[in-house]
Each structure stands twice: as structure tokens, then as C-alpha cells.
Image (cartoon, grey):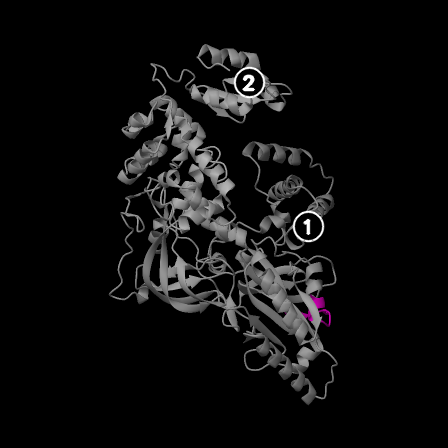
């Protein structure tokens, strides 16, 4: 929900409408109008940000907000500090002032296992027994421990007057201007039964989606990325210019109260949280109140499983004795309450050493750097490897072999290096050099301008890619070898029977018959299908080679333009770019693939083994429909839409799936729907099926 989603024209129009609607007969009416607008906006904001349950469209909210803005602009003396319009706009600070907490914000003791948690329960029970307090079964409030920044918010007469960081627990920084920009923090409390003086404590954090959005913006601006959501939240809160904080998608979740004067709060911690929710705060929907420590252990296990699916980061669970009276009796030690503990999840970030970098080749030829690490326990497992993704990521991190590095692991996500500790860099640290040849097959590596990934060019011979290459070669739209499925291909490669696509044609019935789930008849069928596949088309053969970015349509265009493999093998990038649907990037991929001697040898072997096609005679204008765009819709009777598409592409036309201003012709069969209507509205030429057949006949394609 936003108050700045208007175009300038909409904004001006709405301001005029709002201004024209003002015809107050008295100041009282103006005051009442302003208060009613503020009440509505506060209420709708509460439903949206605190309850995640919006009840009006964003556009209606924006209209109300703009009406309030207009009224306040025309009557500046009536602007109040708790008005929704006052969240953003204060002048930047030169420095943060200090705030002394009236009630210290203490830290919590930690538990790292179920046994630690049971030991905490034992201490609580024994402490209460020593005070002659008998409790049959202690109730505990359970809450996810958000990985954010703890803050204190002070409300007087229901109005937010101060926001401060936890700091050292006794003294924090005044961040009032910044917390006012966070939509889930109420500027004025809901209802009328809250204390006159109320301190609310909570965690300000950055949801996972917001964190990803910030880093995408940073990438687009070529700025430094944020290491993790907690750091991003902390940095956002410590902006001297609150307008910057306002641009960050921060949220706040209340978890307790501090000072309470001039009123009362409920007698249970869990009920206090529900009261805070009623007063306008977001509280965690995963919170629960349970009886006994074993129920706490169960809660921890349940949240552990759910953790990665949550839209925010948590690093543990906080357990508190629910009764406020029992909390008072249990009291505090020097820095922490005796009645609460945080059971932490296994650490997700640790410090270790980058020992070396190896390069792995994926099934598509992508070469990925993998960091070999000094083993370290993180996220519940021992980690010795982490991904470095690609050369751009290595450059962004500025990491070198030998560095001390911070690694992060979240649940089942592959561990990754977050950052290098530059000030601890040893003298022997060395740069990470990407290979110029494939570490598996020694074929040259290629990198297209604008791409971060480096790839192996030996697609037909590289052992790392061979399974994928063969599966593609025998697929239905390529050489269409019936019976040669993925599992059989994998077995053949693993047993060493085939090391390239050319080896397929050396297979014998006896070899296949001995394979798992294969008999002599099935084996004979596969050999027969392989023999039939030798008689193909040039377009199918090009597609079967598996050149990156060369799909069926591009393969057909290449076949039509060059006619035979000899001309294609000698084509330059400039030659290729004369073909419809082939741009600079695709041309570079084709040349890189076909210039590799090993790939050319496999192509020659395939021809030696009998793979052949009819050579297409080159004509002065082999693609008469070049630069025209067609769309097909409805049911065709004499040919399928796939056949029609193939014939049009053979003649050089581009066939797309949607009608636009760039469309030249729409071929409409029976039951043509919305595409026909849109084409007519845009003035696109409409062809029937017979018109299409006549066109194809005109250019020598007979059906």
C-alpha cells in the first residue's frame, strides 16, 4: 500500500477534486474532517501492515491519503505529529543523539540444545521452589527470534514520541525520525485502553523479499550488495537522512513492553502481545503459549522445519515464563532475566579459510568455480565446499585464494561465500584465474559479452556434457530415435559403450539386450530406430547438434539459408547474422561450436556412419518472407498449426504467439477468438487457411 503511486496528471486531478470539495462553514468542521481522515488511514494501515489483512484497494487508500495531504497543505497549522502524512520528510540529521533507557534492555541467555533448554527449566523450577512458590506446570510463551535490530518505542498519550536502538542495553541512539518512516510502526495507538506512558520493544527487520529487491537495485546501479538482511536492516536504520530509510522495505514486530505508567497491561506475556496487536502493532503469527518444557522442545522442532519457508530470517526461538508475576519473582541476574532464554539454531555464518578453487563443468557446459574451504561447522553440518557462482561474483567479492572468508548456509541451500576479511589477508593470497580451456575435455572456453558464465565449447565430446548431448540428439524433435530413453542413455555412457553421439551408430543388438530392462526385441527396435534416424533433414541435424540458443526455428532458418553442412561449417559471424532470427550472440555461439576441431570430427563421423539429408538448393532469395511477422490462431483443417508455422519459417517469416502493432499477417482458422478481434482493431491483414495454402504454393511448398 503506497501513497505515491500516482502519475503527476492523476495527482493534479485528485488535488483539484479534493480542493473543490472543501466548503467548511467552521473550523470545527475542518478539524472533524481531518480527524476522520486520519482515523480511517490509521485503521486501514493497521489492517494492512499489522494484520496483513487489507480491506480496501490500494487506490482507495491513496485517494484518502491524498485528500488528507491536500487539506493539511492548505491548513498547515492543523498538521499533527501523528498524522500519516508525517512519516517522511524530516531534514537529515548531522549526528544521532544518545538515549538512556529508563528500563535497561537486557540480553538473553542462550541455549544450544534441547538439554540446555531442559536445564533452563530445571533452574526456573528450583528457583520458584526456593521461594515457596508451587506451580503444577509452567506455561511458556514461545516466539521466533527475528534476526534484526532491537528497538524501543515510547508512546505518550498514545502518540509516538521516541524511537531508540538497544545500543549497549543502557544507552542507545535516537532514531525517532527513521522509525516514523516504517509503516508497521503506528504513529498513534489504536483504541483507548492503552497506558498513558508506554514503552514498546520490538525487532526491526528486513523480509527476505525486501532484501532481494534491495540487492537487485544495488546490482542495477553497480553498487555494493548487502551481505545479509540483518546488516541491511541495521544500515537502513542508521541513515542520518530518514528519506533513505523510508525507501527500505523495513518491518517491525513487537515482542514485549518496557516502562508502563498511567495504566495497566495484562498479567500474561502472551496476552500483552495480543494487547499490543489490538493497539496497532504487528506481532509474530507463529507465537504460541504452551505448558511444560517438552512442549517447548516440540515447538522448537516444528519451527526448525518451517524456518526456511518463513518470509523472514529467524536465528532461534525465545522462551519466556508466561506469567508476569512469576517473572517478577524469578528476577534477573546481572545482564539477563532468569525467566527467559533463547534457543539458537545452528550458526548459519562462520569464518574459515579459502584453501583453493576448482572448476566444475555442468551438463550445459557452464563452468562454475567451487571454493575448497578449511572444514567448518555451520548451519548444522560440516562445510568444506561453497559455490562462487561465476566470474562476476568473484570480482564482486574481491576474494582471493588464501583469504579468511565468511560463509553462509541457510537450511538446505548450498553454502556460499558472503565476503572476504580483507584486513586479515595473508601475503601468500593469490588471484582466482578462470581457465581458458575446459578442465574436463581441454576444449577452449568461451564467454559471450554481457554474460557472467564461462562455458566449454566442446559440446559433442566433453564427458561432463555428453549425457545431455546424447539425450538431446535422440529426442523427438531432433533425430527422433524411439526407445532410446534417458535412463538407457545414462547406462550406456556410464558403462563406456558410447562417448559421443557418433558412437550410437556402432551399438549392437547384443550390447543393448544385456542392458537392464532390455530384451532382444527392445534392443532390435532401438537399433532399427537408429538406422532410420540416418535419413533426416538438414534442419533436424542442426538442431540435434545442441548448439546453445539454436532452437528448431533457428535451425530451419540456417538450413534454408546455407543448404548443407559444408557451407555452414565455413560461415563467419557476419554470414550467420544475415540469417533470419540469428543475432550477434547466437552467431558467436554457432561459430564457437563449429570451429572446435573435436566437434567437427564428430560431425564428420556421423556422416561417415550414414547420417544424411537432402541438400537444399540455394536460391537468389531463399527466404522471400524475411522481415514479415505472422500469427496463427484457430483450428486449421488441411495442416496443423505446427506444420503451418514450420512452412512459414522455412520461407523466412517470424511466427509469434501474440498480435501486436508489429504483426503483418494473422492466419485465422475455425473458432478464432480474441487474437482475431485484436488483429482487426489494429488493422492487421487477415488470411484464411486457403489464403495461406495459396501463399505456400506460390513459393513452391505443396501440401
Asked where in the image residue 607 lies, by quadrant, the reply is top left
Q: Is residue 124 above or below residue 645?
A: below
Q: Residue at x 57, y 42 (%)?
A: 4
Camera-near label (2 vs 1) is: 2
Is residue 594 at all visible to an observer of this figure? Answer: yes
Residue on which disc 2 sits: 667
Is residue 259 at all visible to an observer of this figure? Answer: no
Asked where in the image residue 570 lies, by quadrant, the reply is top left
- Quadrant containing the N terminus in the rendered view: top right
Q: Residues within 10 Å of mark 1 (few under 14, many from 20)?
A: few
Q: Secondary structure at mark 1?
A: loop
Q: Residue at x 68, y 51 (%)?
A: 47
Q: Is residue 385 above or below residue 140?
A: above
Residues drawn in magenta: 258-272
Q: Residues within 10 Å of mark 2 (few under 14, many from 20)?
A: many
What is the x, y in percent for residue 221? 40, 45
Is residue 268 shown in magenta?
Answer: yes
In the image: residue 327, left or right of residue 601: right
**Mark 2 → mark 1, Cα distance in angstroms:** 47 Å
Q: Residue at x 32, y 38 (%)?
A: 602
| Foreground residue among 222 and 297 | 297
Q: Is residue 221 above or below residue 398?
A: above
| Foreground residue among 342 and 103 | 342
What is the x, y in percent for residue 45? 65, 50
| Foreground residue among 299 and 463 | 463
Mark 2 or mark 1, which has the lower sequence index?
A: 1
Is residue 378 shown in magenta?
Answer: no
Q: Secondary structure at mark 2?
A: strand
Residue on which disc 1 sits: 53
Q: Residue at x 49, y 34 (%)?
A: 476
What is the x, y in percent for residue 278? 71, 59
What is the x, y in percent for residue 336? 57, 78
Amino acid at each position: 500500500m503506497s501513497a505515491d503511486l500516482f502519475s503527476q496528471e492523476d495527482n493534479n486531478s485528485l488535488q483539484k477534486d479534493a480542493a473543490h470539495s472543501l466548503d467548511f462553514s467552521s473550523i470545527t468542521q475542518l478539524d472533524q474532517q481531518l480527524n476522520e481522515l486520519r482515523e480511517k488511514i490509521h485503521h486501514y494501515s493497521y489492517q494492512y501492515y499489522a494484520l496483513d489483512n487489507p480491506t480496501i484497494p490500494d487506490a482507495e487508500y491513496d485517494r484518502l491519503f491524498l485528500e488528507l495531504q491536500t487539506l493539511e497543505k492548505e491548513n498547515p497549522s492543523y498538521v499533527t505529529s501523528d498524522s500519516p502524512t508525517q512519516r517522511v520528510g524530516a531534514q537529515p540529521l548531522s549526528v544521532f543523539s544518545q538515549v538512556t533507557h529508563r528500563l535497561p534492555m537486557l540480553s538473553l541467555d542462550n541455549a544450544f540444545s534441547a538439554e540446555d533448554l531442559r536445564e533452563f527449566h530445571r533452574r526456573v523450577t528450583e528457583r520458584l521452589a526456593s521461594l515457596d512458590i508451587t506451580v503444577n506446570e509452567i506455561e511458556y510463551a514461545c516466539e521466533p527470534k527475528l534476526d534484526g535490530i532491537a528497538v524501543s518505542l515510547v508512546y505518550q498519550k498514545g502518540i509516538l514520541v521516541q524511537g531508540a536502538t538497544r545500543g549497549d542495553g543502557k544507552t542507545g541512539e535516537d532514531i525517532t525520525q527513521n522509525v516514523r518512516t516504517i509503516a508497521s510502526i503506528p504513529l498513534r495507538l489504536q483504541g483507548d485502553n492503552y497506558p498513558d506512558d508506554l514503552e514498546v520493544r520490538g525487532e526491526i527487520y528486513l523480509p527476505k523479499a525486501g532484501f532481494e529487491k534491495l540487492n537487485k537495485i544495488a546490482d542495477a546501479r553497480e553498487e555494493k550488495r548487502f551481505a545479509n538482511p540483518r546488516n541491511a536492516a541495521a544500515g537502513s536504520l542508521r541513515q542520518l537522512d530518514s528519506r533513505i530509510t523510508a525507501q527500505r522495505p523495513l518491518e517491525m514486530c513487537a515482542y514485549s513492553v518496557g516502562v508502563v505508567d498511567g495504566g495497566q497491561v495484562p498479567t500474561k506475556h502472551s496476552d500483552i502481545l495480543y494487547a499490543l496487536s489490538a493497539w496497532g502493532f504487528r506481532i509474530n503469527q507463529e507465537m504460541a503459549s504452551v505448558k511444560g518444557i517438552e512442549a517447548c522442545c516440540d515447538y522448537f522442532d516444528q519451527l526448525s522445519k518451517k524456518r526456511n519457508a518463513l518470509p523472514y530470517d529467524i536465528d532461534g526461538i525465545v522462551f519466556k515464563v508466561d506469567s508476569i508475576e512469576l517473572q517478577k519473582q524469578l528476577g534477573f541476574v546481572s545482564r539477563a532475566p532468569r525467566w527467559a532464554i533463547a534457543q539458537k539454531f545452528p550458526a548459519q555464518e562462520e569464518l574459515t579459510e579459502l584453501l583453493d578453487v576448482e572448476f566444475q563443468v555442468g551438463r550445459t557446459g557452464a563452468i562454475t568455480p567451487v571454493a575448497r574451504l578449511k572444514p567448518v561447522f555451520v548451519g548444522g553440518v560440516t562445510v568444506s565446499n561453497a559455490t562462487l557462482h561465476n566470474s562476476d561474483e568473484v570480482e564482486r567479492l574481491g576474494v582471493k585464494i588464501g583469504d579468511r572468508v565468511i560463509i553462509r548456509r541457510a537450511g538446505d541451500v548450498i553454502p556460499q561465500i558472503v565476503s572476504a576479511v580483507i584486513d586479515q589477508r595473508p601475503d601468500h593470497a593469490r588471484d582466482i584465474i578462470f581457465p581458458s580451456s575446459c578442465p574436463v575435455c581441454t576444449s577452449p572456453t568461451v564467454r559471450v559479452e554481457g554474460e557472467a558464465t564461462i562455458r566449454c565449447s566442446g559440446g559433442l565430446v566433453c564427458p561432463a556434457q555428453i549425457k545431455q548431448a546424447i539425450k538431446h540428439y535422440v529426442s523427438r524433435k531432433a533425430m527422433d530415435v524411439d526407445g532410446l530413453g534417458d535412463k538407457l542413455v545414462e547406462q550406456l555412457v556410464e558403462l563406456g559403450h558410447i562417448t559421443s553421439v557418433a558412437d550410437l551408430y556402432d551399438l549392437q543388438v547384443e550390447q543393448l539386450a544385456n542392458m537392464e530392462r532390455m530384451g532382444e526385441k527392445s534392443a532390435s527396435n532401438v537399433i532399427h530406430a537408429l538406422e532410420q534416424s540416418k535419413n533426416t533433414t538438414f534442419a533436424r541435424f542442426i538442431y540435434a547438434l545442441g548448439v546453445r540458443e539454436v532452437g528448431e526455428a533457428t535451425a530451419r532458418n540456417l538450413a534454408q539459408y546455407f543448404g548443407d553442412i559444408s557451407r555452414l561449417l565455413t560461415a563467419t559471424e557476419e554470414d550467420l547474422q544475415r540469417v533470419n532470427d540469428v543475432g550477434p550472440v547466437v552467431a558467436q555461439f554457432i561459430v564457437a561450436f563449429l570451429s572446435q576441431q573435436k566437434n567437427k570430427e564428430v560431425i564428420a563421423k556421423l556422416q561417415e556412419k550414414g547420417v544424411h539429408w537432402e541438400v537444399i538448393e540455394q536460391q537468389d532469395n531463399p527466404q522471400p518472407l524475411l522481415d514479415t511477422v505472422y500469427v496463427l490462431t484457430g483450428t486449421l483443417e488441411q495442416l496443423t498449426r505446427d506444420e503451418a508455422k514450420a512452412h512459414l519459417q522455412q520461407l523466412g517469416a517470424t511466427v509469434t504467439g501474440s498480435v501486436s502493432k508489429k504483426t503483418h499477417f494473422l492466419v485465422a482458422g475455425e473458432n478464432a477468438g480474441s487474437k482475431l478481434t485484436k488483429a482487426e482493431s489494429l488493422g492487421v491483414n487477415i488470411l484464411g487457411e486457403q489464403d495461406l495454402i495459396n501463399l505456400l504454393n506460390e513459393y513452391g511448398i505443396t501440401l
